[in-house]
Image (cartoon, rainbow, N blue to C red):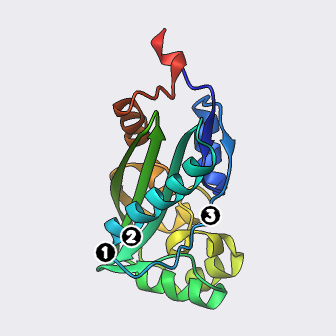
Amino acid sequence: MVTDLILASGSPRRRELLGKLGVSFRVRVSDVDEDIPELDPARFVETLAREKAGAIAVLETDASVIAADTTVALEGRILNKPADIEENAEFIEHLNGRWHEVYTGICVVHAGQTLSAVELTRVKFRDLSQAEIRGYAASGEGLDKAGGYGIQELGMALVERIEGDFFNVMGLPVVRLIALARSVGLELLPWMRG
């Protein structure tokens, strides 16, 4: 049973998903620099997740730590969080009518073990009009999100289809996280034991 679990992320979506699972945790955001040299998208998110988890685990030696990092990639080009509404519109224009990939790196530190993995989900945007692109960007919703959109909010109207874990697109691949945690002896869902 988890006595002290830390989520090393400031993401409100990750907090929401863990909370809905009934997981008891506290948040401690790491100060890891996210401007690491550009790697392929999978290595990029896994590296950041491992660095964030490790930074908190060093400070909180008696706690278990979960960290995650998400990015969107279009034909190998990483689209992190847009800097402003104009860049957000550019991101949506690039994704317009196309398939892209959402990668989330997750890392669990527990009982002296560190284990990480990457989840991949493919997402296809429907064909959007210029008014829809500008309107969505102007909403400001996508400014704090990888790829410049949130699938669980207004951005749901942009998405035509997904292949893979929906929750990965929100920023936390729940099933992969549960399996990863169990691999290091960390039970996140004690209520499932019946």
Q: Position of residue 156 (x, y in %)?
A: 54, 61
Q: What residue is at 50 percent from the left and 80 percent from the top?
A: 92
Residue pushed farthest top? Answer: 194
- For label 1, the residue is 40
Circle 2: residue type:
Phe
Q: CA distance from mark 1 to mark 3?
A: 29 Å
Residue 49 visible at all: yes
Front residue of 18 and 164: 18
Q: How many marks on residues?
A: 3
How many neighbours does mark 1 have within 10 angstroms: few (below 14), some (14-19), or many (20 or more)?
few
Q: Are marks 2 and 1 in contact (CB under 8 Å)?
A: yes
Determine whether, in the image, residue 153 is placed left or right of residue 114: right
- In this view, the mark in front (2 or 3): 2
Q: Residue at left 53%, top 58%?
A: 52
Who is closer to the viewer here, 31 or 181? 31
Residue in front for this viewpoint, 60 or 22 = 60
**What is the quadrant of residue 16 in the picture?**
top right
The first of marks 1 and 3 along the sequence is 1
Name the residue beneath numbered marker 3. Answer: 154
| Residue 163 percent location from the top left of the image | 31, 55
User: Under tag 2, what secondary structure?
Assistant: helix
Mark 2 = which residue? Answer: 44
Residue type marked 1 = Asp
